[in-house]
Amino acid sequence: MLRERRGTFMYSAPIMLLLDTSMTMDHHRIRQAVSDIYEKGFDTVCVEFRNNIYDEYDPQGKAAVRVVSEECTRLGLQFLMIMPMLGPNIVKEHPEARQSWAVEHTGQVVDKRFSIAIKRVHNVGFINTDPRVRGVAKAFHIIRDASRRIIEATDITDRITFAIDMNIETTLAGTYEQDGEILVYARYDTDYMDFAYSGMHKSVDSFLEQYEGLPLDGYAIDEFGAGCRSSEDVYFVGGHYLAGFKAKYGYDLLDRVYLLKNEAVDACAGKVRYDYYQLTIDLTYGLQKYVKDRYTERFGENLFGGFHSTWWGEGNSGDLWAGNIDYFRLTDNLSGGFVDAQFDAERTMVSMTMLAESLAKYSASGHAYNMCWDRNTTKGKLDYYQRLLAVRNVRWVGHAYGYVGPFGPGYPDHSTWDDTKVCLERQKTFQQFIGTAVSKPKLAMMYVWESVAYFNNEYMHYHRLSLKAVLDKMMQEHLEIDLIPTSEADLERYDTLIVLWPTMLPEAAWQSIQGYAATGRRVIFIGPPAQCTVEGRDIRSEFEQLTGAQCVNPSAGKLYTGDYEYVEWDIWFAKSKIEMHMFPLTPLAGETTLIHDGDIIGVSKLNVEYFSFEMPLTSYFETLLVTLSHARELDLPPNTISKVSYDGDNAVLSMTGRWESRINCSFSFRGNKITITDGVLVGIRLEGNRVVEIISDADCTIEVNGSKREYVTIG
């Protein structure tokens, strides 16, 4: 449920301070760095050891951190440590609790013999050792139908003989009594800790011991997730994880491990995939909560708690592997809505900023944060995107002061460092001006991460592409929209609900959607069709009844023939282009609304519409946007970014130009005709229907109902 926002306002501008070896040994330079950060307007220093032979366990590291703490205290800055990856600090103490991974290998038994090339799997950072093949976790003899779905899977783990031959390439060769296809799950030992290990909290405790005596103002566990973090189809099969899985779901994961990548005729593969990834999210949540509870116990309430979970390519899909894709739930243990984004792409910046705003509404503070940066930051990028954050009332997590390697900019050695002062002054001004006012959209889009788990193949990345496209295009069209979790029960405050990718939903969410549709409000389904609930119940017939159409199975989609947006940079980890699919429909009680190259991909039944393709990535979405124009609160030109926020009967309008564009427009709001000429950043506050306060950069002309109005100059 949405949280009530606190009535108090708090300015917030954190920045990462990265200590490399040289800075660690130069305390004078550390003091200069903290002073420099203070002078620019940042109020929170978040310390991390990076590119450093020392860390918090070494006397040199402890001494450097104490200097940072003392300087922050002197200047009145908040100070906190960024906690390293959990686990590596205790793995030597508990080697028996290391992770084991399994990777699927397909082979053929011919004349009762088989030979399989074993994949080389790499570590995912934080340690220096790679996974090692150590046998077979599970093996199955497989029979498939013509569509490659598994008809029969026979456990042959104890019935095969094999030997592993390690050369430049590793092979697994052996025998089995029956010819045909086999799936072999090679087991790899790693030097990561099993996140399901009951003693994982010792990793947190160990870090806290190193911070003893420091007056910490919060905590940060950057990019943390209790998933495997690998894109190489790696699955946990360690003893602690398997025991936790069986305790939670009542079955042995290894008995159904083949369903993590394969479809089967008489099994709900989606549920197994959901169960697997839900447990990783549970583990992430539990460890984050332990951090929050321990810090609260030691340092008190109202701590800063970050950072983002949206790290795998800046949001969604890949975060499924990391164990942190349920951003709304994980916000429980943070002090606001946190995201990560890069200046490389405007769509990423816009969509992740809007995600942060929605997450913030489910946080205790109501504050939204965006840790945004760029490998090639320019003055133009910094200026525009910091104005974007100011207008949307999203706080910047500065990245970063110190040596950052390829992940720039590395302040203060960058041409935009001096510009950050103006950026923060603008943000502070708008944070104070907007205060606790929030947007109140009539449009909502449900964030169905569960459907990403249903696919668990390369096509799942289209969820992120469509999600970002919707949010980006809504902002460009000045349509406010809330992104909401599947746990949200109060849907009736919205006039229209978009359900992106309804393929697999929690039972409660599916019931809520049907109940919402029954009230006559508009429901728009987009993407692959609904198949089942996360509990495993088949809902295909119910979805057909609701939408008035029968749809092909998600695995039987056709290639979309036509132009569509494909942001290759956004799925940089894909080895080749992933083709977009559509899922043809057969109308039953519904009316056809869209035909593409002879295939029906759009239907409607009363107030329910279904578009069975990635509509937001095509020009067809423009037609849908037109039907939503009634929800637009400000009629502004497309080269403008805006937001309308409310605090009771009072309203706050905030706007800026896109990139180098100035604000030159006239619009009406609450009976007032407002004209802005040559504006850069503008904020307008209304009490009821009366304009009572205006802020703007200098040299802007603002008229209200034909009369020129004075304003407070920003900066």
Image: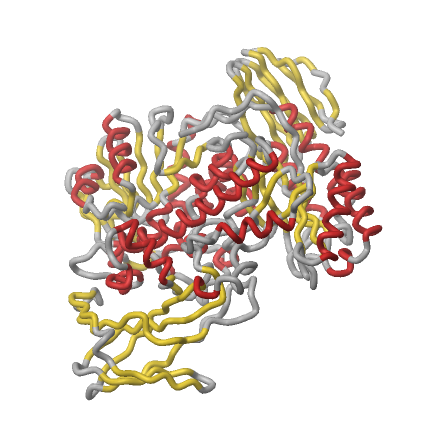
**Which quadrant of the rendered structure holds the C terminus?**
top right
Which residue lies at the image location 72% right of the left edge and 58% below the top edge? 20
Question: In the picture provided, is 659 more to the left or to the right than 531?
Answer: right
Rendered residue at 51%/64% (across/down):
124
Quadrant holding the N terminus: top left
Number of disc labels: 0
Residue 565 in view: no
Q: Position of residue 674 (x, y in %)?
A: 60, 19
Closer to the camera, 424 or 123? 123
Residue at x-position 24% and y-position 80%: 160
Residue 615 lies, in percent from the top left, at 37, 46
Left or right of 697? Residue 493 is left
The image shows residue 188 at horizontal and vertical percentages of 41, 71
Q: Residue at x 34, y 47 (%)?
A: 450
Q: Quadrant of residue 654?
A: top right
Compared to residue 236, the image places residue 710 above or below, namely above
The image quadrant that residue 49 belongs to is bottom right
In this view, the residue in front, 67 or 554, is 67
Q: Is residue 213 visible from the viewing direction of this image?
A: yes
Image coordinates of residue 98 in percent, x first then y, are 45, 64
